Image (cartoon, grey):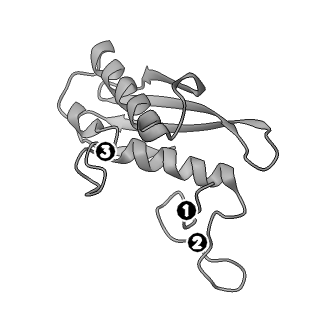
Amino acid sequence: MAIDLYWTLDGDLALDRNGDLRDTSFDQLRSTLQEIRTRARSSLQDWAIHPNLGANLDALLGRPNNKFTAEEGRTNIISALTMHGFLKKNNVKVKYVPISRHQIAYFIEVKVVLSDTMQTKLLKTQLLYDTEEGSLKVV
């Protein structure tokens, strides 16, 4: 299990009750969820040691909000989540829905097997991408 700093939805570092930086060592699901969000929000060349890692949704900027654009985003998200064996493809589902003329909602579901109990849990997160502004929000 990877241990990461604990980030809030706003992207801020979280503190524990003692005022120390909080981490995800206590919560494998939180660690996995943060990695999912990081990979989905990253673009190619964002990471020097992994230049091909990221969903690269920036490439959809200016494109029409149609099935082809949404499907490309879906494919890119799945690729980012399965790269380097982070998740298995058969454990990842990504669906999309056009929300407005320029916005696509991506619904991500991932099956995770907890390393300590071997239980399978379902993680869910949503992203909202705007093809006109290029903005990406976790909702």
Q: Which of pointers 2 and 3 indicates the residue nearer the eye?
A: 2
Q: How dense is the environment of label 2, judged by Cα within 10 Å: few (below 14), some, or many (20 and up)? A: some
Residue underneath mark 2: 14
To which quarter of the image does residue 3 belong? bottom right
Q: Distance between the residues labelled 1 and 3?
A: 18 Å
x and y percentages locating residue 131 in the rendered image: 26, 33
N-terminal of the pair, mark 2 or mark 3, is 2
Q: Nearer the viewer, residue 88 or 130?
A: 88
Q: Which of 31 and 73 is in front in this view?
A: 31
User: Which numbered tag is attached to residue 45?
Assistant: none
Type of the residue with mark 1: Thr
Which residue is located at x 71 percent, y 86 percent?
Answer: 18
Q: How dense is the environment of label 1, judged by Cα within 10 Å: few (below 14), some, or many (20 and up)? A: few
Residue underneath mark 1: 8
Residue underneath mark 3: 135
x and y percentages locating residue 15 in the rendered image: 62, 77
